[in-house]
Amino acid sequence: MTYYLLAMHQPVGDPPPPEVLDPIMRDLGAVKDEMKAAGVWVFDGGLHGPEASTVVRMRDGDVLTTDGPYAEGKEHLGGFAIIDVPDLDAALFWARKEAAAVRLLPIEVRPFHDWAQG
C-alpha cells in the first residue's frame, strides 16, 4: 500500500456563502465516511487561509521568521486527505469523488515516498 496526498486548492478570499458551502461540506463528509468504510482513510484536515501562515527559514546562519505564506498566489492549499491505497488508480478513484464533492476546485494527487510509511 502507498500513502497518497489528496490536496484541495481553493482561491484566496472569503469562503462561499452557506447556501453554497454547506452542500459541499456535506458531500465531502460523505466521501470521508466512504473512505473510512473502505479502510483507506488515514488523516485529513482543513487549513486556515494563507494569511495565517508563518514561514521559518535559515539565511546566513540565522533563523528568520516571517508572517504570511511562503509563496504568494491566487490559490492556496485549503485542505487535504491522506489515504493508503494500492496504487495511483485507486488514489485517482478517491480524488474523483472529492472533486465531484467540491465541484469546481482541483484535487492534486501526489504519492508519498515509500520511506514515509515508517
Image: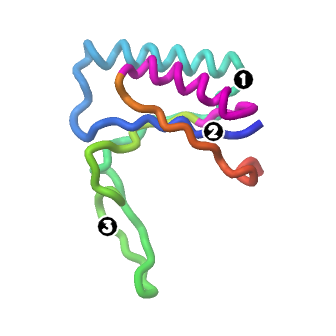
Instruction: Give the image quarter of residue 1.
Output: top right
Residue 39 point in image, percent of width and height: 72, 23
- Across and down, in percent, residue 105 comes to 37, 29
Range covered by the magenta-colored residues: 82-103
**Residue 27 at x, y percent in the picture:** 45, 14
Spatial distance from mark 2 to mark 1, Cα to Cα?
14 Å
Q: Position of residue 73 (x, y in %)?
A: 28, 50
Badge 1 amino acid = Gly
- Amino acid at pointer 2: Tyr
Q: Is residue 38 above or below residue 51?
A: above
* Closer to viewer: mark 3 or mark 2: 2
Q: Residue furthest front?
A: 89
The residue carrying mark 2 is 4
Closer to the N terminus: mark 1 or mark 3? 1
Q: Which mark is residue 39?
A: 1
On screen, residue 56 versus residue 112, left or right, reads left
